[in-house]
Image (cartoon, rainbow, N blue to C red):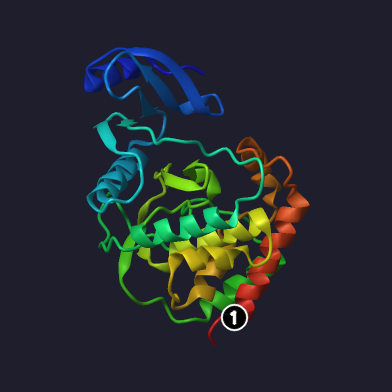
Amino acid sequence: MTVDASALTWAETVLGRPVAGVRSLRAQGSPWLLDLDGGDQPTAVLHTGRPPADLRTQAAALLAAAERGVPAPRLLGQDPSGLLLTTTLPGGSHLSAPPTVPRLRAMGAALRLLSSVRMDPTPELPLRARAIEGEEFVPSPLQRAAEAALAALPPPSGPTVLVHGDLWTGNTMWIGDELTGFIDWDCAGVGHIGLDLGSLRCDAAIQVGRAAERHVLHGWGEPVADLARWDVLAALSTPADLALWIPIIHDQGRTDLDAATANARRDEFLERAMANLAP
């Protein structure tokens, strides 16, 4: 797959200089890394092929993140036809081994900053009740039991904040153990403070194993009300069989992680969270 010539022309107009090279950043498609001729900014990222509503959401989220200093790409331009242009972040997201304790804590600390951006829903940033909202998975028996337990609880309370909506290690950028930012904001919106934290803790458990999620919470720095609720909800936002996601995880460099291990770790995380749910 190649990027459309008209999209490149638009990007060059926004940037004010020619594009010297193009490279796909994901599965031979969008987003595209643009190598630029001259100037202080050598690269940019062009998003194409997504529904225009998704790109409007991403643009609104990046603007909100920039206002509060959240580490994320900065918006350079958007076109109503479904084009989005952003800066790049230094470093990379490739991970050939389980994330280290410093990385887990750094993600928790950065997420605390993101979750300080209090917002009400807007058309571009709708209310999100769960991660990767819109993706529907057939639940396992354990997940069905968790759904029932969650349904018995009163609705969550408290302020709503800017949420990333798809927070896992593959959507973070690093130089060594220094987090340079969160990427891929097309699932963003507004939600309760624990939504992203649960997602990050669930991913930590899948990537590393039992108790890794506590290092994320350590980086966050303070107790979170209804933490078990958000952990359960995060585990419900994953497919019953994580074999569906293993190619993505392997593409990020974790070729040592197999579906059986990922499923066992996720289920153990979910069982612990269910045991801690408030009556």
Front residue of this view, candidates 30 and 44: 44
Check the image and report above or below for 203 versus 59. Answer: below
Q: Residues within 10 Å of mark 1 (few under 14, many from 20)?
A: some
Residue drawn 52% across the image and 39% down it: 93
**For this view, does 245 lie left or right of residue 51?**
right
Q: Which SS class for mark 1?
A: loop
Check the image and report above or below for 278 versus 44. Answer: below
Question: In this rendering, does residue 74 appear at all?
Answer: yes
The spot of residue 88 in percent (x, y) is 38, 33
Residue drawn 64% across the image and 69% down it: 270
The spot of residue 218 in percent (x, y) is 50, 68
Q: Quadrant of residue 82?
A: top left
Q: Quadrant of the C terminus?
A: bottom right
Front residue of this view, candidates 25 and 82: 25
Front residue of this view, candidates 122 and 198: 198
Residue occupying the far bottom of the picture = 279
**For this view, does 114 lie left or right of residue 130?**
left
**For this view, does 13 lie left or right of residue 184?**
left
The spot of residue 162 in percent (x, y) is 33, 58
Front residue of this view, candidates 22 and 130: 22
Residue occupying the far right of the picture = 260
The spot of residue 96 in percent (x, y) is 65, 40
> Looking at numbered disc 1 in the image, what kind of residue is underneath it?
Asn
Mark 1 lies on residue:
276
Residue drawn 67% across the image and 72% down it: 271
Question: In this rendering, does residue 79 appear at all?
Answer: no
Check the image and report above or below for 279 versus 161. Answer: below
